Amino acid sequence: MNRKSVFAFCLLVVFTFGAAPTLLAQDRIVARKRVVAPDMQLENVQLKRQKVSDLFGSFSFQYLVPVGLEVAHGGEEPTLFELELKQGTLSELLKQFVAEHPEYTWKIENGILNIFPKDDYRDPLLRQLLATEIESFSVAKRTSSWNFGKNLLGTLEAKRLIDSYRVTCDSGYPGGFYIQQLGREYSFDVSHIPLKSILDKVVRESPTTRYWILSHNLVERRLFLRVNAIAEYVPN
């Protein structure tokens, strides 16, 4: 095998097996556009994680379900979170989850699976932040997920609230196998819209974004926003 053939083979291995999920990028983009519904059929779901954010992050990537997650008050303490279902519907899977973790509930709204705490378990900062109306916000083409989160939390309205709680912000990091982008051609401008609606808009419309997760670490006094995306398929 000559050098060019070896190089081509290595690239094939990297792009096929180097990033989750294991489906080809083109298939991921197409599958992402299916309608999320309670009766969506699922098979062989078996996920165990120590954080609820990791659990639904993995679920979103592996089963192509756009997710928005608001973590319960103090809910990022390491414990065991599971999603297990041999065969059944999305509704059946989620009913099992909330039965084991009664602080959470769920609903499907605007094509997104929302996992969020019941009223008694909501974090006051997260509750107010998600409802905060942002006067003006825009996303340019090729915006990274990291910059999107940083810019959203840096808006005047969000920053005013965050500063009043005296917490720091963490929107992830730009490193990794690839720089996660919201889309090469994806952009928008919005005004007078709740912060949660902006997050939902990106997860629903971006060709690459799979989920958003918002949590508040009470010990470290740190607000955490993660918006993750897959590598974008660009046809030749």
Image: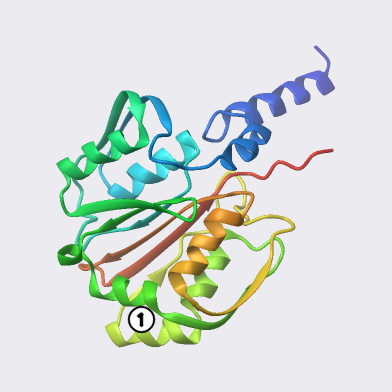
Tell whether 100 sits left or right of 204: left
> According to the image, label 1 marks what residue?
162
Q: Position of residue 91 (x, y in %)?
A: 32, 38
**Left or right: 141, with 51 as reference point:** right
Q: Quadrant of residue 50?
A: top left
- Examine the image and state in which quarter residue 16 appears: top right
Identify residue type, mark 1.
Ile
Residue lying at 70% horizontally and 25% vertically, measured from the top left: 12
Residue 133 is situated, as x and y percent measured from the top left of the image, at 45, 81
Q: Residue at x 64, y 30 (%)?
A: 24
Give above or below for 66 relative to 215: above
Q: Nearer the viewer, residue 86 or 12?
A: 86
Residue 74 x/y as whole percent: 19, 62
Between 80 and 85, the residue placed more toward the observer is 85
Horizontal side of 180 relative to 37 (left or right) equals right
Quadrant of the image containing the N terminus = top right
Residue nearest the observer in this picture, 191 or 40: 40
